[in-house]
Image (cartoon, rainbow, N blue to C red):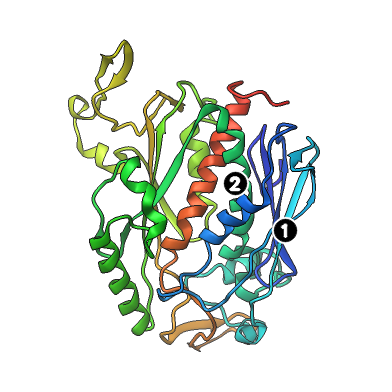
Amino acid sequence: MSDNSLGRSLVMVSFGESHGNAVGVLIEGIPAGTEIDEKRINEWLARRKPSTSLASTKRKEDDIVEILSGVYRGKATGAPFVAIVRNKGYVDDFYSFAEEGWVRPGHADYPAYVKYKGFNDPRGGGRFSARITVGFVIAGAIAEEILKPLRIEVVGYTKSIGPIECPDLDIENARKRYEFETRCPSAEHDALMQEEILKAKREGDSLGGTIRIITGKLPVGLGQPVFSSLDSELAKAYFSIPAVKGVEIGAGFRASKLRGSQNNDIYVLRNNEITTLTNNAGGILGGMTNGQPLIATIAFKPVSSIYKPQRTVNIKKMEEGILQLKGMHDACVVPRAVPIAEALTYFVLADMALRGGFISER
């Protein structure tokens, strides 16, 4: 298992850099005969493109998938699947400061330079850019197809941006998230979030926020305890998204303030089926699904690339100075990260379904 891979029965290998020729993904373990719909994959990719009205990056990419192997007549062959998306909308001139040795506050420039002895590609963050998540989204589109026999639906929405927070929503009300610029399916909160993002942009600054992931009820027993528990694998996947700094399952940190009598999800019978009165566990107990909806909350830090002048260090000259960035940067990545978080959730659930025998591998 490589350091650029995720999964065991369904394995995703991520490759590419922000300003390289392409970004993409290799996937092994797709059951032969799985439908591979290029149009559907491109629809997924379109969801992570910059907004037309928000203070998003001006870097515009076509983001059209090119499938190189593993598909014949629209079906997975069982061989390794490889797909790429070409990089076209970047401007290298914006990153002359990186070639000179200036490291950006909040970015991976400094540790990457030290770890790779200066041979890493620094343009646009290189391997550490959110551009690599294109491959995650391709993998998620395929995982969604793999999970169809289990009728699993994953929905993510913007829960908060800066100080603006939307109330908790159920899956029914969250489905319309892509009708809103911020991916928050509340007209009132969407408007407030847009205003907050544009304000930060005008000030040359940025914002963070949270994404809530919810599903319908899941089959009982998805997950492979102990080190491959479902929550462990989800956390690993979510933390692979650039800018993620926190993950909660269910009540999360709020549970630490409750008593057991308040936090325990009481089992009851409804129509001769076992269910719970609450879902503080977020659908996972002992690393396995308990039949309730999965609920996860993912926290994103503010975008590190801001237009305000900042103190920093030139690692080649070993001197301090002031760096003011140019280029094409989002003021808030949260809306664009919603499909990425959904994709990784689908992927982890598909891997667990294959590993647990819920779906035939071939």
Residue at screen point 63% across, 43% down:
142
The residue type indicated by label 1 comes to: Ile
Q: Nearer the viewer, residue 146 or 262?
A: 146
Q: Rounded to the nearest whole Å, what is the CA distance between mark 1 and mark 2?
A: 14 Å
Q: Position of residue 225 (x, y in %)?
A: 52, 25
> Could you say whether the residue bearing mark 2 is in a helix, strand or loop?
helix
In this orientation, which residue lies closer to the viewer: 144 or 7? 144
Where residue 28 appears, as percent x and y from the top left, is 73, 39
Q: Which residue is mark 1?
A: 84
| Amino acid type, label 2 | Ala
Q: Is residue 296 above or below residue 354?
A: below
Question: Dots 1 and 2: beta carbons under 8 Å?
Answer: no
Q: Which quarter of the picture shows residue 262?
A: top left
Seen in the image, is 257 located left or right of residue 246? Answer: left
For residue 130, which numbered disc appears in the image?
Answer: none
In percent of the image, x 31 and y 46: which residue is there?
173
Q: Which residue is mark 2?
A: 141
Horizontal and vertical percent position of residue 190: 30, 63
Q: Residue at x 62, y 27 (%)?
A: 354
Instruction: Name which quarter of the figure residue 130 lies in.
Output: bottom right
Q: Does the rendering let one see residue 211?
A: no
Q: Please state if 26 lies on the left or on the right of 55 as rendered.
A: right
Query: Callout 2: 10 Å neighbours few (<14), some, many (20+)?
Result: many
- Residue 345, x across and y down, in percent: 51, 42
Give the mark nearer the N terminus: 1 vs 2. 1
Where is the N terminus found, in terms of image quarters?
A: top right
Residue 103 sits above or below residue 75 on the image: below
Secondary element type, mark 1: strand
Label 1 neighbour load within 10 Å: few <14, some 14-19, many 20+: many
Where the C terminus falls, by quadrant? top right
How many numbered circles are shown? 2
